[in-house]
Image (cartoon, rainbow, N blue to C red):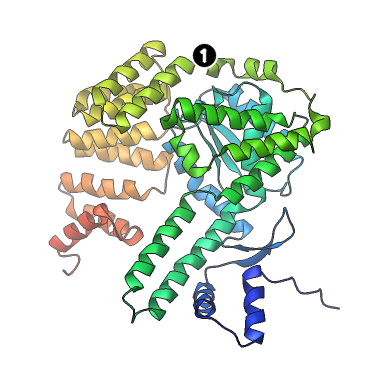
């Protein structure tokens, strides 16, 4: 006998009932248009590894893995790479592996690293490539809080939230096209399109509150099964709420990607006091956390100064930012993030030679990390040294291949060297991959001016 057919997604199930009644609404017609248009891109329905229910996804598991491989190195480098403390990274990996014993997708390629970013956050890519900033590591007080943080991110991976968001976003995008086509005779059409675009952007910008609640519940479950007290999740939430009240700018990124509320904290507390009450005396492992993160926690004054400097930079208060980065470097002269941020601050003030000295020092202390190399190339372009910039850009591409911006900047450098044909090749490559935006406009204008493109 053939296996029983899997139940359809809720969207499709409701539509089928209305088809049987011949009661299709305008919304249903649009949904059908969208689903047909999306068919090549959407992966369709899948079974949730967590609930067993049917969910709409936009990525296969193989695509989730591909996203991690292609995109995570660039994001981790944008956050200034993993901290140069192998013991801290190994420790965080140990805690993550301990939690993995309880997950629903044990075969995913989970990985963990503490990043040099100073802001407070943690995030994961769809297949489990995870980053935890040094900014949050120095705020947490024990291993149970760290386990709660990792457990929450594991929850996003195991519930396939990224795949669901991708599926919903693809459907939303083509539904907008269908709605605009069906409404082309209406004065409201531009407003409908605009409103849908705003909604789709919001969907792509962060997890939904329902996603966050599900990740909390899963994370607390993993936490308990890993042998930690359930109130580790409560204390993590309270830490973040308190930090937001005290220093809101430091948590802007986390709260935009992970919507926070006292309701989430209170739910975790209720579960800790009821469902997980028997677990209340499990060890939080404070002493072990303090021992294993001691080297990183010694940098807390440096990290605090960097956070203040980054906040000042975001508000265009450059002299204040420079003072904060100067303080950070006085505390820790070889701190890679402080050196890079100081160089960026000096560049913003037009002090390119001073900035270049800090970049050179940054490259010496962390030769395998790419951001200082790219910043050095930018400075050399500003100092009218296109050959030096090109050499740095080629070095950056070897360290971190696949960045379209590097292709564009190589075109700029080659143009500055008078190598028009080589520059045109780079500009054409860039426009092919990134057809819109200011850089694409510049590249297109050069290709037109040189006769490679018709106007």
Q: Nearer the viewer, residue 204 or 28?
A: 28
Please tell me which residue is depicted at 73% across the width and 46% down the height of the picture. 106
Left or right: where does residue 194 sit relative to residue 79? left
Please tell me which residue is depicted at 72% across the width and 61% down the height of the picture. 53
Q: Do we see residue 187 in this rendering? A: yes
Q: Position of residue 149 (x, y in %)?
A: 62, 34
Residue 98 drawn above or below residue 447: above
Q: Quadrant of the C terminus?
A: bottom left
Q: Position of residue 415 (x, y in %)?
A: 18, 48
Q: Quadrant of the N terminus?
A: bottom right
Q: Position of residue 385 (x, y in %)?
A: 19, 35
Q: Quadrant of residue 390?
A: top left
Please tell me which residue is depicted at 53% across the width and 59% down the height of the picture. 166
CA neighbours of label 1 inside 10 A, class few (<14), some (14 to 19), many (20+): few
Q: Do we see residue 94 in this rendering? A: no
Left or right: where does residue 101 sit relative to residue 185? right
Secondary structure at badge 1 equals: loop
Q: Nearer the viewer, residue 250 or 427?
A: 250
Numbered label tally: 1
Q: Name the outermost residue toward the top.
A: 330
Left or right: where does residue 74 sit relative to residue 372? right
Q: Quadrant of residue 288?
A: top right
Q: Position of residue 246 (x, y in %)?
A: 46, 25
Residue position marked by numbered label 1 in the rendering: 298
Q: Quadrant of residue 24?
A: bottom right
């Amino acid at each position: 006998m053939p296996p029983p057919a899997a139940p359809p997604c809720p969207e499709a199930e409701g539509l089928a009932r209305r088809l049987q009644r011949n009661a299709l609404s305008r919304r249903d017609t649009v949904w059908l248009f969208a689903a047909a248009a999306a068919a090549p891109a959407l992966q369709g329905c899948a079974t949730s590894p967590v609930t067993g229910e049917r969910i709409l996804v936009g990525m296969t598991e193989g695509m989730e893995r591909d996203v991690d491989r292609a995109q995570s190195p660039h994001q981790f480098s944008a956050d200034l790479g993993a901290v140069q403390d192998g013991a801290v990274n190994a420790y965080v990996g140990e805690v993550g592996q301990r939690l993995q014993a309880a997950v629903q997708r044990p075969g995913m390629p989970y990985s963990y690293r503490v990043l040099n970013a100073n802001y407070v956050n943690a995030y994961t890519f769809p297949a489990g490539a995870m980053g935890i900033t040094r900014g949050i590591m120095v705020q947490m007080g024990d291993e149970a809080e760290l386990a709660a943080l990792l457990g929450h991110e594991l929850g996003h991976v195991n519930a396939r939230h990224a795949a669901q968001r991708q599926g919903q976003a693809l459907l939303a995008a083509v539904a907008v096209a269908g709605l605009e086509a069906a409404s082309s005779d209406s004065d409201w059409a531009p407003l409908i399109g605009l409103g849908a675009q705003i909604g789709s952007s919001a969907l792509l910008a962060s997890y939904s509150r329902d996603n966050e609640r599900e990740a909390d519940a899963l994370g607390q479950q993993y936490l308990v099964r890993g042998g930690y007290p359930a109130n580790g999740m409560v204390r993590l939430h309270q830490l973040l709420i308190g930090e937001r009240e005290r220093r809101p700018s430091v948590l802007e990124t986390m709260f935009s990607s992970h919507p926070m509320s006292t309701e989430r904290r209170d739910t975790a507390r209720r579960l800790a006091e009821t469902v997980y009450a028997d677990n209340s005396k499990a060890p939080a492992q404070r002493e072990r956390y303090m021992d294993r993160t001691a080297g990183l926690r010694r940098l807390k004054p440096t990290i605090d100064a960097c956070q203040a400097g980054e906040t000042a930079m975001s508000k265009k208060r450059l002299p204040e930012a420079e003072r904060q980065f100067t303080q950070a470097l006085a505390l820790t002269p070889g701190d890679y993030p402080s050196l890079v941020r100081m160089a960026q601050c000096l560049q913003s003030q037009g002090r390119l030679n001073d900035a270049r000295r800090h970049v050179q020092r940054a490259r010496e202390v962390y030769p395998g990390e790419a951001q200082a190399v790219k910043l050095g190339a930018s400075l050399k372009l500003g100092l009218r040294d296109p050959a030096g910039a090109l050499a740095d850009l080629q070095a950056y591409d070897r360290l971190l291949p696949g960045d379209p911006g590097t292709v564009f900047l190589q075109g700029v450098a080659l143009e500055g060297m008078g190598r028009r044909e080589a520059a045109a090749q780079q500009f054409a490559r860039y426009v092919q991959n990134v057809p819109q935006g200011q850089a694409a406009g510049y590249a297109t204008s050069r290709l037109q001016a040189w006769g490679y493109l018709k106007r």
